[in-house]
Image (spheres, helix red, strand yellow):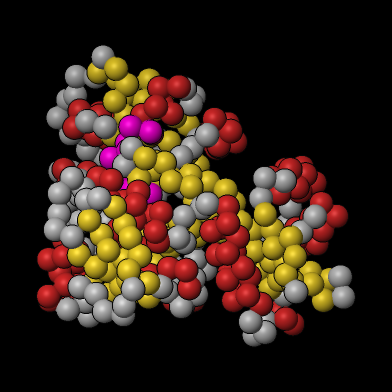
Amino acid sequence: MIRTLEERDYSQSLQLSEYAFQYKLSEEEREQRREQMGDQKIFGIFHDDHLAAKLHLMPFQTWFGDRMIPMGGVAGVATYPEYRRNGYVRKLLLHSLEAMKEAGQIISMLHPFYIDFYRKFGWEVFASYRQMTVDQKELSPLSTSTGTIRRGGVTKEVMEAYDRYAKKHNGMLVRTNGWWKKKEDQWHVATYHEGEMQGYILYTISEGVMTVDEFLPLTPGARKGLWNFICQHDSMVLTVKVKLAEGEVLPLMLKNPRIKVEDYPYFMTRVVDVEPFLKTYLRDKETFEAFTLKVVDQHAPWNSAVWHLSVNGVERRDGSTADVELGIRELSAFTFGFLSAVDLEAMGHIDAGEVAWLESIRTTRKTCFQDFF
């Protein structure tokens, strides 16, 4: 029996998180977590009033180009060892899908402990990042930029720059003022200005390591200027680690591009409600030849149908055959722009004859996700 946790259950939820994820909260952190729980739905399975397993569902929005899409963030999935292999997490995930549909959260995202586990339930990787590691001796500035760097805090300009960057991508979190307020004490902030502010970095320096958690240039000048600012720390640090969005060109611009760059598959997404999602997705498409798409989703049966896609909208159709057939995982990765139709064919998910149909509605924006929950 799944029920939504109440305030009286919060202590048990915190205890399970501490046990499962192997950390210990201070009293101040414990109180902060309890406050945050008021904004979440926490589903739990109990044995004799003892919490055995839980899942947190967080209400967010994500940018899909310049549109905001309601998103359900899945986090804090945990089970005590003595209750594992009873299918509790499966039940909680399926329950969360129904709850998200009811709440109008047409997509979902999560950070997986094991990617293949969540693939079983329809989530798929949609965003990766690149970790660039540069030794002190390789901190060589690029050609001089004409702008200036300012160090300071999170300002309205920084928040607006993030939104401008996010609107060029699919999947980035819509950050509220509350989000920025909770996070701003974690970083130093440096901004690049050439007339207006054109980019920023969020970074920390500790024990000889400079860690750049966000490298966000809006212009080529900002890209050079922010990197040159990083290089000015060569007398302070032995190593610089920069987290880059997939496709960021900075490593190729360095005087010695033969540096350590690692790719990390990061967050997963899932279309929760196909019909409203496709209607939102197709608003960008001014012209394409109508076709039918069969979606297979064994865990959210409301999605399993044949859908007629055209410039006039999305309609459910009778029948079992269609021009293109996709599982919910593949549909999610394709529509976000993480995989192309050619990729899906190479992976054996579609036939060659289906490629052209999908390519006609492919998004041109890249995926990106900078956050964690």
Q: Nearer the viewer, residue 129 or 207?
A: 129
Quarter holding the N terminus?
Answer: bottom right
- Residue 99: give x, y in percent of width and height: 60, 60
- Residue 207: give x, y in percent of width and height: 50, 44
Judge from the rendering whether residue 146 lies leftward or rightward of residue 183; answer left or right.
Answer: left
Q: Nearer the viewer, residue 15 or 150?
A: 15
Q: Nearer the viewer, residue 35 or 40?
A: 40
Quadrant position of residue 53: bottom right
Judge from the rendering whether residue 280 lies leftward or rightward of residue 221; answer left or right.
Answer: right
Q: Which residues are magenta?
A: 163-171
Q: Residue at x 47, y 31 (%)?
A: 188
Residue projecting furthest to the bottom: 85
- Residue 130 appearing in the image: no
Indicate yes or no whether the magenta region holds residue 94: no
Quadrant position of residue 47: bottom right
Indicate yes or no whether the magenta region holds residue 170: yes
Residue projecting furthest to the front: 318
Q: Nearer the viewer, residue 170 or 287?
A: 287
Residue projecting furthest to the top: 195
